[in-house]
Image (cartoon, rainbow, N blue to C red):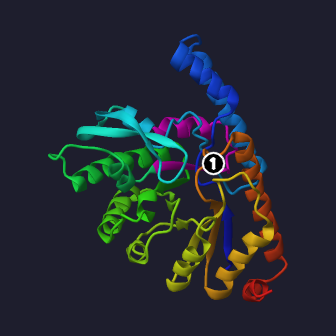
Amino acid sequence: MEMIIEAELLGGFSRSPRLRRILRRYEEKADTSFVEVNRVIWEETILLVGVQLGANLTSVVDPMVEFHDPLRPFVEAWRNVSIDGLLRWFDNNYFYRVPIFVDLPDPRRLVTPQRTKQLREVLPQKTKLKIVLPGPITFARLSRYPQNIDYVELVDSIASILRHEVSKSAENGANIVQLDEPFLGDVDASVDDAILAVETIHKIIKQVNIETRLAIPFNVPSEDVFKELQNLKVDYIILDFADYPERALSLARKYSLKALGLGIVNARDIYLEPYEKISRIVKTILREKQIDKILLTTSSWLNLVPQEYAIRKTNLLGDLYKRLLDELSSTDTNGVKEWASK
């Protein structure tokens, strides 16, 4: 079987100064129109889709430039939940508004299917489109809710809504769905969280003909948590190799993985990684493991650095991917181990 290497961004982009200014004018000063704001958002979305196509990545992710944080669009689309004060988004200089549940969520509308349809209309027909959803474990863990709401019931309710998001988005042309569960890499994440994550993710992706990823940015899960995640039937589990290469490599070495997502381009700084650093990690994995598929991606969304640098990181990922393919194409299928040993 020929080894497959793919490359795509983990998530959305930061906003340009132009978009930040017009959103501030609209939200704080009320001196521009809703139509004008959406025109600028769409122009920026098309630009960032073009950046990904120009980098020759194997799929395009929704840039999500108007998302204030990964949870907010869903909070605003559901009944029985509102937003409260700001908290830090894990260990980043980036904040989100805390969802406050008063009852189990009830969707007024879906978020991703309309976006999928709009993007599919402008993308080349054969281009794969990825949507990104907040995982139900992380969503519930980062929220507040009264004692009469059971945690497991809340997770299950969120998962039920996300299942509809995935199903309808697939109907509208999405090819890939990624569920972000950064909480699974947190020191407070337990084996029970991992078991519940496996159950709910399978519920979300059940009977949907779409490629699947579980992304765990900002940290690497403990061995006990990762062991349970081996039961997940997804195409890739994506680990943060940029920030924690040794811990991620340790998990890759210990478990029998046929596919692995490498968050290998650091999305939390502005510096461009040399090819030698990336290829060294890839070669180590290929030399030591029998891997059928590798996904090269960023360590997190690109909304943590200014957009100028986010675009540079996108082009860097495309360049690293092309160079790796060129090196591998010079050998036959049976020569991968030999190439990795050089």
Q: Residue furthest left?
A: 148
Disc 1 residue type (three-letter): Leu
**Residue lying at 79% horizontally and 76% vertically, measured from the top left:** 328
The N terminus lies in quadrant: bottom right
- Crowding at label 1, few (<14), some or many (≥20) Cα neighbours within 10 Å? many
Tell me where residue 127 appears, x and y as whole percent: 67, 50
Tell me where residue 26 appears, x and y as whole percent: 55, 17
Can see residue 247?
yes
The segment highlighted magenta reads 111-133
Tell me where residue 149 appears, x and y as whole percent: 18, 47
- Pick the residue in front: 157 or 118: 157
Of helix, strand and loop, which one carries label 1?
loop
96 in relation to 129, above or below = above
Tell me where residue 230 appears, x and y as whole percent: 43, 75
The C terminus lies in quadrant: bottom right
277 in relation to 302, above or below = below
Mark 1 = which residue? 302
**Residue lying at 61% horizontally and 72% vertically, measured from the top left:** 245
Classify residue 185 by image quadrant: bottom left
Can see residue 110?
no
